[in-house]
Amino acid sequence: MTKHLYWTLLQHDDWNLHLAATDNGLCYVGSQGASFDELAEWAEARMPEYELVRHDTEMERYTHEFSKYFQGSLDVFTLPLDLVGTPFQQRVWQAMSEVQYGSTAAYSDLAENIGRPQAARAVGAAVGANPLLIVLPCHRIVGKTGSMTGYRGGLPMKTALLELEQTRS
């Protein structure tokens, strides 16, 4: 039996993001303005047993929450997630999800929060492997001095998300 990876293109104001979900929940949020190829390459590498199927209706529950987020009326996502990662990545992503809307934390803060204070670089790698941009708020993770650091969606996207949250928090 073929497994389906449903996807849609969320378009809200200037935001254009590919979203993908399995029957169990959201599993991927793409970079702002990225082509479908970004999603296709991720799916081939991470979920090769799934067939990509565009299904805008199936994805409405996800696009609805993203629209509310971009309008400033949602600061915590309640979507079902289908998140696959190593136990270490899962711990980092859980710690990252606890960084509040409108605030930031350093990689070293996440390392402390998971009980691995010397693992800031490994934490950075786990943050970088996050497939759920915005939902698992890696845009809120900054350098120790508060400096902007790498982001899968690019620093302009990270900056725009932080500005969106800071103007509405």
Image (tube, helix red, strand yellow):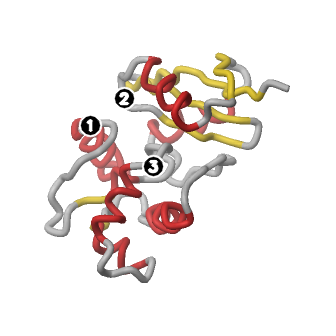
Q: Between marks 2 and 3, how big is the CA–CA gap?
A: 15 Å
Badge 2, how many Cα within 10 Å: few under 14, some, many 20+? many
Amino acid residing under circle 2: Gln
Q: In the rendering, at what x and y percent does residue 118 appear?
A: 29, 79
Q: Which is more foreground, mark 2 or mark 3?
A: 3
Q: In the rendering, at what x and y percent does residue 121 appear?
A: 28, 65
Query: CB atoms at circles 2 and 1 under 8 Å apart?
Result: yes
Query: CB atoms at circles 2 and 3 under 8 Å apart?
Result: no
Q: Nearer the viewer, residue 116 or 164?
A: 116
The numbered dot on residue 154 is 1
Mark positioned earlier in the residue sequence (1 or 3): 3
Q: Nearer the viewer, residue 24 or 10?
A: 24
Q: Nearer the viewer, residue 101 or 30?
A: 30
Mark positioned earlier in the residue sequence (2 or 3): 2
The numbered dot on residue 130 is 3
Where disc 2 sits, the SS reads loop
The vertical placement of 10 against 45, above or below, is above
In percent of the image, x 44 and y 63: which residue is there? Answer: 96
Where disc 3 sits, the SS reads loop
In percent of the image, x 68 and y 28: which residue is there? Answer: 50
Q: Between marks 2 and 1, how big is the CA–CA gap?
A: 8 Å
Q: Between marks 1 and 3, how big is the CA–CA gap?
A: 14 Å
- Residue 13, image quadrant: top left
In percent of the image, x 17 and y 63: which residue is there? Answer: 146
The numbered dot on residue 32 is 2
On the rendered image, what quadrant is the N terminus found in? top right
Amino acid residing under circle 1: Gly
- Residue 116, image quadrant: bottom left
Q: Nearer the viewer, residue 1 or 65?
A: 1
Q: In the rendering, at what x and y percent does residue 90 appear?
A: 54, 62
Amino acid residing under circle 3: Asn
